[in-house]
Image (cartoon, rainbow, N blue to C red):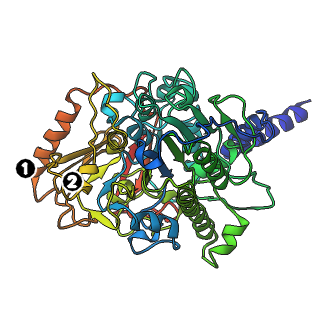
Amino acid sequence: MKKILLITTMLTVVIGSFAWVMRSEILLAAVKYRLSSIEVADQRELNWQQGPLENVTEANQRPANIILIVADDLGYNDISTFGGGIIKTPGIDRLAKEGVVFEQSYSGASTCAPSRAMMMTGRYPTRTGFEFTPTPAGMGNLVNLVGATMDNNLPPSIYDATREADHPPFAQQGLPADEVTIAEILKERDYYTAHIGKWHLGRENGMAPHEQGFDDSLLMASGLYLPEDDPNVVNAKLLFDPIDQFLWSALTYANSFNSGDADRFKPKGYLTNYWTDEAINVIQANNTRPFFLYLAHWGPHTPLQATREDYEAVGDIKPHRKRVYAAMVRAVDRSVARILDTLDEEGLSENTMVIFTSDNGGAGYIGLPNVNQPYRGWKLTMFEGGIRVPMMIRWPQQVPADTRIKTPVAHIDVMPTMAAAANAVLPEGRMIDGLNILPLINPNSEHVWQRKTLFWQNGHYQVVRHKNWKLHVNQRPGGAVKHWLYNLAEDPTEQINLAETFPLQIQTLLGLLAQHQADSVAPLYPPAAQYPVMVDKTLAEPFEEGDEYVYTPN
């Protein structure tokens, strides 16, 4: 009997020890198993609303059509528009050549969801409270556990379960329903409004896109571009990235239509291609009336998945993950080209404003060091690489082709600019932080650009750009505060930290940050995790003593 008890005890210890060592793998498998039980219906035809069968007014005499195309995690150096590029991107290059390129254009935040909220509302997170990117319950803890098993020498991540317990369910983490979106504004001008793709601003309690002003919404209900075992897919898994490991476990292949998170069904093909097909259907179905189309691509965000056709087309790029990523960029570029071609075919090009941007800079966690060149930093940092994004506008009837603008602009400007294009009235009784940037384009405009300051905020990580001075403020665990100060006129890639040289300039900029905070609202929910992110190395490289890094809360 004693022998049996001894063996049982030893087995319990061994199994327990194994389970402890393999705890992250067990939890990832549990996530995958749980989500695999969610029902996803077969493909279906979508019933987009149809405009009048005949033109009541000629296209060039109607209010302008507006198309906003947003890529996800697209690096500044991923496209060929600025002289580099992971591959040639003729579609995006054409849009830039036929319109205006803003040479100092910024995302609203260093992560996706707050940027998207700012594009929809024109308001800073300090006014809406929508400061952090929504994450499913347990994601922060799981990413923290997986990250702790990796041998990259990074400073430790921090996870606070009590804070995550204060979060509402994932579907209820979003932009408050009483915020006024550009879709709601344009509907007041009798626009048809359609959303396709990513939303990430809530799916319940009035926060889903079809509840926030969009007549129709084809929503990314999950995030695989194709099923992992599809014969036409090429996958690239990133074993050095805990977020990537979570995504492969948590995501499925599903969309929904006008139903928020419910009634999921399988898309018809690779997401980037399928959403573009449906965007073309929207344009063709509504070519006789003003429309607003928000095409929010998932590409080239992880998980890295490309079609075999695109993978073969980009050539023998090394390493494998870079080739898959390049193929994903090719798909996004082809989408832009197809949208422009469709506008030409439908006779809508002259009076359609097309805006292209990315929600933030390229991510360091994909392990590709050149995606944001020449700028330092990545997504999750507010160095220029994390918040410098392409922003270009094509509107032949109003915008002169082949124009470059050096004035700094940002995602908060997207909403008031689209409203101005439609001669729409901005909502009364609420502060709009963004500005209409169209006067910057018009060489005959008498408008004098007044704004000198832009702000970014992610919890304790705060940044201000005032004229050409830029200050980062980042708190370390334990309370120590790190400052970086740069003169972007002389040092646009942030190489020389002037914090010790110009202490009075730091105090001036800190004063601007304090003013920005003076009438701010609290975040809708607190950050549950903090992650160290290296400024000059990707996640595929080991951290070494002396490497610069930030802590980013979410």
What x and y, as percent, mark residue 486?
Answer: 20, 59
Residue situated in front as seen by the camera: 488 or 144: 488
Side of 473 relative to 87 (left or right): left
Q: Quadrant of residue 100?
A: bottom left
Is label 1 in a helix, a strand or a loop? helix
The residue beneath circle 1 is 504
Three-letter code for the amino acid on which mark 2 is drawn: Lys
Q: Secondary structure at mark 2?
A: strand
User: Which class describes the residues within 10 Å of circle 2: few (<14), some (14-19), or many (20+)?
Assistant: many
Q: Quadrant of the N terminus?
A: top right
- In the rendered view, tell whether residue 97 sits above or below residue 204: below
Residue 439 image offset from top left, x and y in percent: 23, 50
Compared to 437, does 478 lie above or below? Answer: above
User: Which residue appears at 44% of the width and 63% of the height?
Assistant: 95
Could you classify mark 1 by the number of other residues whose Cα lies within 10 Å: few (under 14), some (14-19), or many (20 or more)? few
Number of residue marks: 2
85 up-or-down from 415: above or below: below
Nearer mark to the viewer, of 2 and 1:
2
* Residue 221 visible somewhere in the drawing: yes
Query: Disc 2 marks which residue?
Result: 470
- Among numbered discs 2 and 1, the one appearing first in the sequence: 2
Q: Amino acid at mark 1?
A: Leu
**Residue drawn at the location 31% of the way across and 29% of the way down:** 127
Tell me the quarter of the image containing the C terminus: top left
Counting from the top left corner in percent of width and height, residue 233 is at 74, 60
